[in-house]
Amino acid sequence: MAGRRNTYREDEILETPFDVHHLMRAGVYIKPYALKMILALSLSALGAITGLFAPMITQHVLDVLVPAKDVKKVVLMALLLVGVFIISIICVTFRSRMMIGVSQSIIYDIRKDLFRHLQELPFQYYDDRPHGKILIRVVNYVNSVSDMLSNGLINIVLETINLIFIVIFMFLVDVKLALVVMCGVPVLAAFMFYIKNKQRRAWQMVSNKNSNLNAYLQENIVGARITQIFAREDENAEIFATLSDNCRKTWMKAVRYNNLIWPGIDNISVLVRAGVYICGLIVFANGNYTVGTILAITSYAARFWQPIMNLGNIFNNFINNIAYLERIFETMDEPVTIKDCDDAVDMKPIKGHVEFENVTFAYEEGKDVLHNVSFTVEPGESVALVGPTGAGKSTIVSLISRFYNVGEGRILIDGQDISKVHLKSLRSQMGIMLQDSFIFSGTIKDNIRYGKLDATDEEIVKSSKTVCADSFITKMHDGYETEVKERGNLLSQGQKQLISFARTLLSDPAILVLDEATSSIDVQTEKALQTGLNAMLKGRTSFIIAHRLSTIKNCDKIMYIDDGGIAECGTHDELMARKGLYYRLYTAQMDDIA
């Protein structure tokens, strides 16, 4: 179990410095909404500055109008005070509504770009990462940073403006008492500097722990059946409890740093206001300080620390979310290694001539899966790939579709180097049936139409009948309109494969790849399907990977893949006559069946 936990050890760098370039780079998502943000800022600033007149109005009422017993002006000042508060409320309300729209638009833009980039990343990226860690970046992290990029930036400017005007108003009321209030600033600066780095590292750790938990949770939801088959519920619950406890501990540690901010600022604020009372009533007591003046200064002092507290909270959010922003850009910066070259051209309509020229390939550097492989397949030929597990059969067909780049050599289709053609023009002419037939949420019809969106209902039914899928589809409660859940959980593995066959046939590929495509289909259905398979293979260059050797006896060519290359090649009869590797594999399988 300890080894299992190590799988979820953090794989991300924690000690990355705060990089302002991340915020500058995020400007591309802010720019389209700059005018709305400026308007929102203007409304907020208007409301905030209007509200700053309240202490001055109060001072004037207490020091001038009340002693003069001017009731009429007191009433007018009261109405003016009400007007000040109404203006502030209106400005804040409009600003809030406007920024909700901006925030959601930023979420949409970032998530759209992130998803588009993920769609272009090579198989290798998904091979190397738990899918849960990818998912949390697209959903949770984007939600977190959007508010920082919208309200967060506006609030920084707003609170700064508010702070400046509060200082101006304080000095207009009294210079000496204003200086007393300002004495707390150096103390606050030292306090904030002390906890900044510790706080950021703590929230980065929270980010990683949550990512680990999400990855393990997603994996166990997908693998729930396997968990129950092997009675792993207790062990998995213990691992999940450990990961969850790690999240709790790191969160509590990070929150402790967060909770140092506002009490620290609040304590400094209380001490400063106490200093104002002491200095105003005792130290500077020369008859110049009226009750209105002291109340006005203390009111501004309280307001002075409020934007500082707000800036501290914003700073907290920035510390928390800058790590998320880093992770988002880290994903966006992931190189798209499988892409069109600068001088790429469209793949011409494929006839089906496939040639490997001294192809070498490795998933990991220095560990070749294929080494110096060369072969030629003529248009319309059916080629079976057999051999031991891990020999490179699936790798060969993946390279033909250019899901990976070759390390050395070339792959040609009809004389065109596939590394120099547009990927879409290549893959749109290929049909690939995998052993794990993936079914999307939606109707059966939508799944069959997935590769040819303009297909008619008649074409869908025809392709389904050809591959023996129509018989079970029409028996379902809504036929082709039957809704299937995530990954087709309502369907058997055999039914999934038949639907995938129909989907592949409907796309009318020029080159067909069947990778253990009938592994989950029973023998009786497979025999009935053979006619449909023959129709699919007719006139198409096809590559068939099958462990059930009886299904590939009639292929034009059989290649035995072993030790990084082609150990044997020929027809079934030729290879049986040689009595080599294929002969031993075939006879052993026939003996097992017998």
Image (cartoon, grey):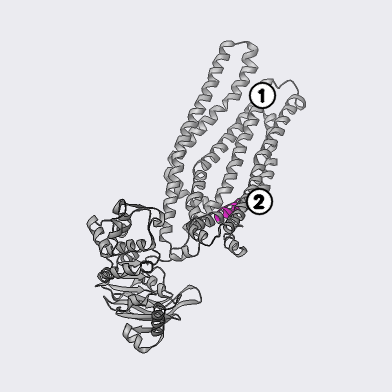
Residue 590: say if magenta. Answer: no
Residue 50 or residue 309, whichever sits in front:
309
Instruction: Tell me the residue at 46%/32% (across/down).
Output: 94
Quadrant the C terminus occupies: bottom left
Residue receiving disc 1: 295
486 or 44, which is in the foreground? 486
Q: Quadrant location of residue 437?
A: bottom left
Indicate whether 419 appears above or below 469: below
Residue type at numbered disc 1: Leu
Q: CA distance from mark 2 to mark 1?
A: 38 Å
Crowding at mark 1 (Cα within 10 Å: few <14, some 14-19, many 20+): some
Q: Position of residue 407 (x, y in %)?
A: 44, 75
Instruction: Name the chief secondary structure element in magenta.
Output: helix
Do the residues under discs 2 and 1 have CB atoms within 8 angstroms? no
What range is drawn magenta here?
203-211
Asked whether, in this view, residue 593 is left or right of residue 259, the answer is left
Identify which amino acid the numbered label 2 is placed on. Answer: Lys
Q: Nearer the viewer, mark 2 or mark 1?
A: 2
